[in-house]
Image (cartoon, helix red, strand yellow):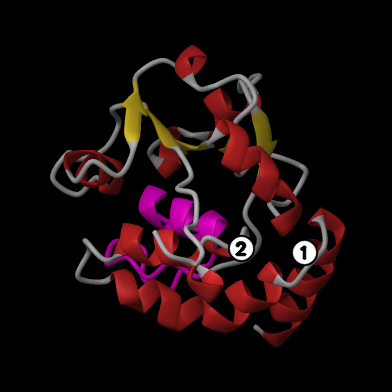
Amino acid sequence: MLGCAGKVQKQVRLIVYHAGQCDPKKCTALKLKRHGLVHVVSRMRLIPRRAVVLNPMSKLAFSPSDRHRIEDFGLAALDFSWERAEKPLLKHVRGTSRCLPLLVAGNPVNFGVPTKLSTAEALAAALYIAGFKEQAQNLLSIFKWGHTFFKLNMERLESYMKARDSGEVIEIQKQFVNLM
């Protein structure tokens, strides 16, 4: 994949822990798997030990400083039903947990709802923030509504992408919360 200045950009390995709690016809993780874009695992212990895990219960925000870790060890998402996610997510999750900053869902199930992203949106957001814009856009291109996520969140994503670390991401997020 070509990145800036025609350089070949490394693809980030994407892993999804799938809890089997959703409608398989609407599940974005399973659609990503069918398109060969993610590796789905059925046990949390199969998540690579040093991967960055997108976990909404984490105290640290995902930031561009996580780029090297996801390049080397991968990016993992946890695919749970929102109604049943809290208890398992509070347990120790293998990997380096990070939560995403404020973003708005573009998927038809939770359209316009802050923080209720689909698994595909969460992965795409993290890739974008880490500077893997092309891989992020490719990920959501298989969904009719994929462009909507970027349209709703472009200003936020671009701002988060310019942050140095988790602390700066939180400061930027505060500005967006005040605008809501």
Answer with left or right where residue 62 lies relative to residue 3.
right
How would you rate the neighbour count of disc 2 (Cα within 10 Å): few for under 14, some for 14-19, many for 20 or more?
many
- Residue 134 horizontal/vertical position (percent): 42, 66
State which quarter of the image contains the N terminus: bottom left
Label 1's element? helix
Label 2's element? helix
| Amino acid residing under circle 2 | Ile
Answer with left or right where residue 154 lies relative to residue 137.
right
| Amino acid residing under circle 1 | Val
Q: Earlier in the sequence, mark 2 or mark 1?
A: 2
- Residue 152 horizontal/vertical position (percent): 46, 80
Please, what is the dominant secondary structure of the magenta stretch?
A: loop
Q: CA distance from mark 2 to mark 1?
A: 10 Å
How would you rate the neighbour count of disc 1 (Cα within 10 Å): few for under 14, some for 14-19, many for 20 or more?
many
- Residue 110 horizontal/vertical position (percent): 36, 63
Q: Does the magenta portion include 58?
A: no
- Residue 110 in view here: yes
Answer with left or right where residue 34 lies relative to residue 166.
left
- Residue 128 horizontal/vertical position (percent): 54, 64
- Residue 55 in view here: no
Between residues 58 and 74, which one lies in front from this camera angle?
74
Quick one: which residue is furthest to the left in this view?
25
Q: Which residue is mark 1?
A: 169
Residue 176 higher or lower than 138, as above or below: below
Seen at 49% across and 57% down, the residue is 9
Q: Which residue is mark 2?
A: 129
Seen at 59% across and 72% down, the residue is 157
Residue range in magenta is 104-127
Labels in figure, total: 2
Residue 14 higher or lower than 19, as above or below: below
